[in-house]
Amino acid sequence: MIRDVEVLSSLVETIRRFVHERLMPAEAQVESDNLIPAALVEEMRQLGLFGLSIPEEFGGLGLTMEEEVTIAMELGYTSPAFRSVIGTNNGIGSQGIIVDGTAVQKAYWLPKMATGLVIGSFALTEPDVGSDAASVRTTAVRDDDHYILNGTKRYITNAPVADVFTLMARTGGKGADGVTAFLVPANSPGLSLGPIDKKMGQRGTRTCDVILEDCRVSADAVIGGIEGRGFKTAMKVLNRGRLHISAVCVGAAQRLCDESVAFAKARVQFGKPIAQHQLIQAMLADSGTETFAGRSMVMEAARMFDSGQRIIQEAASTKLFCSEMVGRVADRAVQIHGGAGYMQDSPVEHFYRDVRLFRLYEGTSQIQQIIIAREMTAERR
């Protein structure tokens, strides 16, 4: 686990160079091909990016929350697709195993996830189930020492390249207590994939349906070996996921600010750079201020997380603010660029589309508002 300031600083600088020298030059290719080059995925493996949050004993870097969000901000500076491919390995895919998995599950899966030899995917959303996650309809019926799974999962990130799915299915009655978490290998009999989704943005981040037709998995696939604990497992790791995404939003906002400043300095109208026009300055100032505010919220909430404090409200507040904030920064960036910002060869054009998704996953903005209000009005001793 990294604790030395110099070691962390060196890691941050290494990843920053990787982002600027290797990932940013490949953004246009990823946007065009809707695919991350295999060579870059391998470089990400070599840098240890698939195991940022996985404990050192299992081959990961074991970063604290504060350290992880620092790295996530650097990765957010480039196309979200690059961060997304490592996201589940560092998020619900591994964290669910870390907090609730059996010793055997930890020993088998975590080292493979940490090295990126196994790519994880989180399968919760269904055609009729999104924000109401406790209403999962996919079923899992016990059959001796196996379970038979039936159902369809929708918009599943990394599904086309995943080796294992952390998948939620119903083993009991209605509500959250009937949901169980399974580790389902992608090559399980009865598991198939739908066509790759055509999305508004975040090209290179591939999603598709995961279809379960009498999919047979071992009873050992139940995370923790206990039925009915899947929803609770997911809730345990949500705070970490929300802070990670918030940090990515801050990184994207900083990239948009930098692109806007560079363009405003170079673009001349009415005899001077538009950066000298007050209305442009106002947009730059608002974006810079909001980016700083988001960064401050992320770092403070991460420190609270690491100290063991209860941060349900703070994590939801941070995710709400940062995901909404980066959308406003992206909109201003396009406005500052004018017509050039609407062209597909402009970074701000694809970021404008890419960041829209941040307001939807890890809980929509409206779900965050409900959580915040609930926490504010709760009576606690």
Image (spheres, rainbow, N blue to C red):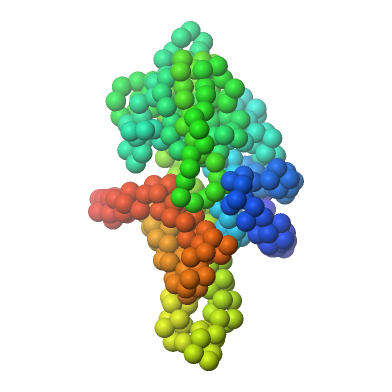
* Residue 226 position within the rendered picture, expressed as x and y whole percent measured from the top left: 46, 23
Q: How many numbered discs?
A: 0
Q: Nearer the viewer, residue 372 or 118?
A: 118
* Residue 192 position within the rendered picture, expressed as x and y whole percent measured from the top left: 52, 24
Report if residue 295 is visible in the image: no
| Left-right relation of 74 to 377 | right
Say which residue appears at 67% left-offset and 39% top-offset.
116
In the image, residue 185 above or below residue 364:
above
Q: Nearer the viewer, residue 208 or 245?
A: 208
Say which residue appears at 45% left-offset and 81% top-offset.
280
In the image, residue 145 above or below residue 318:
above
Residue 317: quadrant of the picture: bottom left
In the image, residue 350 above or below residue 177:
below
* Residue 299 position within the rendered picture, expressed as x and y whole percent measured from the top left: 51, 62
Residue at the extreme top: 144
Residue at the extreme bottom: 271
| Left-right relation of 107 to 156 | right
* Residue 167 position within the rendered picture, expressed as x and y whole percent measured from the top left: 48, 29
Q: Nearer the viewer, residue 48 or 210?
A: 210
Say which residue appears at 42% left-offset and 19% top-offset.
150
Report if residue 364 is visible in the image: yes
Say which residue appears at 48% left-offset and 65% top-offset.
342
